[in-house]
Image (tube, helix red, strand yellow):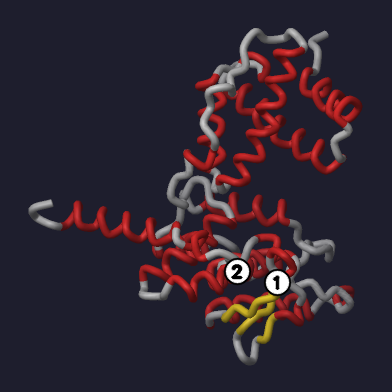
Amino acid sequence: MARDLVAEFLAYLRVERGLAANTLEAYGRDLAKLAQFATGRQKDISTLERADVAAFVESLFGAGLDARSVERALVAIRNFYKFLVLDGHRRTDPTVTLAQPKSWQTLPKFLTPEEMEKLLQQPDITTEVGARDRAVLELLYATGLRVSELCSLKIGDVNRDVGYLVCLGKGSKERQVPIGRSALTAVTRYLQFRAARRDDQSNRYLFVTARGRPLTRQACWKMVSEYGKQAGLGVVTPHMIRHTFATHLLEHGADLRSVQLLLGHADLATTQIYTHVTSERLRETYRKFHPRS
């Protein structure tokens, strides 16, 4: 029977290093993704080489993860291969010469207005689940909320009369974000379904499952991903919709400081990545349409 080297590694971290349960769980998730990636290449996770790990890191960026999230995953991967070398399972560590993810960072991926419209049209709004999903997509695009912020929204956080919501962002910082007419219409339609459910009156979360439980981050990611595939758009994530929100605002003349406040970025430098996105779009338009480009 083949040894489960990932399980042995996690046991080593728990017993010898005394890592916290949350850290072990995160390591396990990251290594499970790498193992699945290895299987797709008809390899075992213990036999991957530098090029394989680099391709995996690129796939994480392609899935919409930011450099910080990828860096956390790479910490788990580096420690895993160090363990394999120390334990005699490998002679070399494939991550030794791998660059830090921050130096790999690519421009955020986003949807065009036409692609975003196509995504929004996917849910069947004649059903409660479809109405909920349309409201989720509309609200993500209208506000640029992080998926964790969206899932924690209560019904009372949305002021439908004035057209704004209040959310709790990173560092427990509260901010107000305007909501457009289309998103308000979608939310109102969904809440009409909710109002018809007698067993739902005590649940104050805005978005809930068919069983009345709060919608989770994982369920939201899965839902967005499935609609993206259904629309023929490939990999679409809630974070990509956040990127789309910011990019479309800047392309239509919004100033960077306003976008920073709407996104809830503590540092303006974080928001400035979107100026690179719009600059690249301008260059591409120039190359495509200028006769002497």
195 w.r.t. 228: above or below: below
201 w.r.t. 266: above or below: below
Look at 74% across and 8% down and name the residue there: 88
Q: Report whether 119 appears left or right of 91.
A: left
Q: Which residue is under mark 1?
A: 173
Q: Report whether 55 appears left or right of 46.
A: left
Q: Which residue is under mark 2?
A: 264
Q: Quadrant of residue 110?
A: bottom left
Residue closest to the far left: 292
Count neighbours of disc 2 (C-alpha within 10 A) and say few if under 14, some if 14 to 19, many if 20 or more.
many
Look at 20% across and 53% down and name the residue there: 288
The percent coordinates of residue 159 (x first, y second) are 67, 86
Tell which of 6 and 273 is nearer to you.
273
The percent coordinates of residue 22 (x first, y second) are 83, 43
Residue closest to the far bottom: 161
Q: Amino acid at mark 2?
A: Gly
Q: Quadrant of residue 100?
A: top right
Count of numbered marks: 2
